[in-house]
Image (cartoon, rainbow, N blue to C red):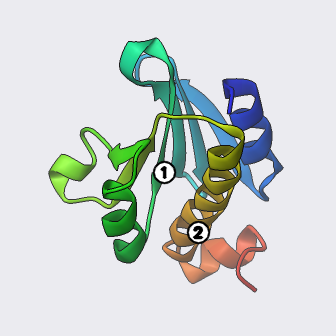
């Protein structure tokens, strides 16, 4: 997945906002909370970071092309970095980005969820 594809996909999700921050990373938010980050991984290749469930965190941590996200995981947060883009993993990445969006949106206040027309 390229940055353009990443940004197009994240932008297609309802009520998202985009900002460049943290050393020119592509940061996507829902209700002001981060759900996806596009930055540079090893060898200056695109790397994408997203929040996961506990089960997916354990599973993906052991899978080639995925690893606990630097900074986040070292603080006990369940975030994964994907850094090996292929057609097959792009489909997987789309799924995990959608799940990250869902997980983060469920953590918003009920009032904000209603205001953003989420999880109704």
Out of 41 and 114, give the one closest to the viewer. Answer: 41
The reply, left or right, for residue 7 in relation to residue 31 is: right
Query: Residue shown at 76%/86% (left/top)?
Result: 120
**Percent x, y for residue 113?**
66, 75
Query: Residue shown at 44%/41% (left/top)?
Result: 65
Q: Quadrant of the N terminus?
A: top right
Quarter of the image for residue 8 reads: top right
Residue at far top of view: 44
- Graded by Cα atoms within 10 Å as few (under 14), some (14 to 19) or many (20 or more), the crowding at tag 1 reads many
- Mark 2 lies on a secondary structure that is helix
**Percent x, y for residue 101?**
61, 61
Query: Where does label 2 land, which residue?
Result: 105
Q: Vertically, is 83 above or below 56?
A: above
**Percent x, y for residue 68?**
30, 49
Labels 2 and 1: the sequence-earlier one: 1
Query: Residue shown at 58%/59% (left/top)?
Result: 96
**Percent x, y for residue 63?**
39, 54
Query: Where does label 1 land, which residue?
Result: 50
Quarter of the image for residue 58 reads: bottom left
Out of 73 and 29, give the one closest to the viewer. Answer: 73
Q: Vertically, is 120 above or below 90?
A: below
Out of 117 and 35, give the one closest to the viewer. Answer: 35
The reply, left or right, for residue 8 in relation to residue 67 is: right
Residue 6: image tag: none
Query: Residue shown at 62%/47% (left/top)?
Result: 89
């Amino acid at each position: 997945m390229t940055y353009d594809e990443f940004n197009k996909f994240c932008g297609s999700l309802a009520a998202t906002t985009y900002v460049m921050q943290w050393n020119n990373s592509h940061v996507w938010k829902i209700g002001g909370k981060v759900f996806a980050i596009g930055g540079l991984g090893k060898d200056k290749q695109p790397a994408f970071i997203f929040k996961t469930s506990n089960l997916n965190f354990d599973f993906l941590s052991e899978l080639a092309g995925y690893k606990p996200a630097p900074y986040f995981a070292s603080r006990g947060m369940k975030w994964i970095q994907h850094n090996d883009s292929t057609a097959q993993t792009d489909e997987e990445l789309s799924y995990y980005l959608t799940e990250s969006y869902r997980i983060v949106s469920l953590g918003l206040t009920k009032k904000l969820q209603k205001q953003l027309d989420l999880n109704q």
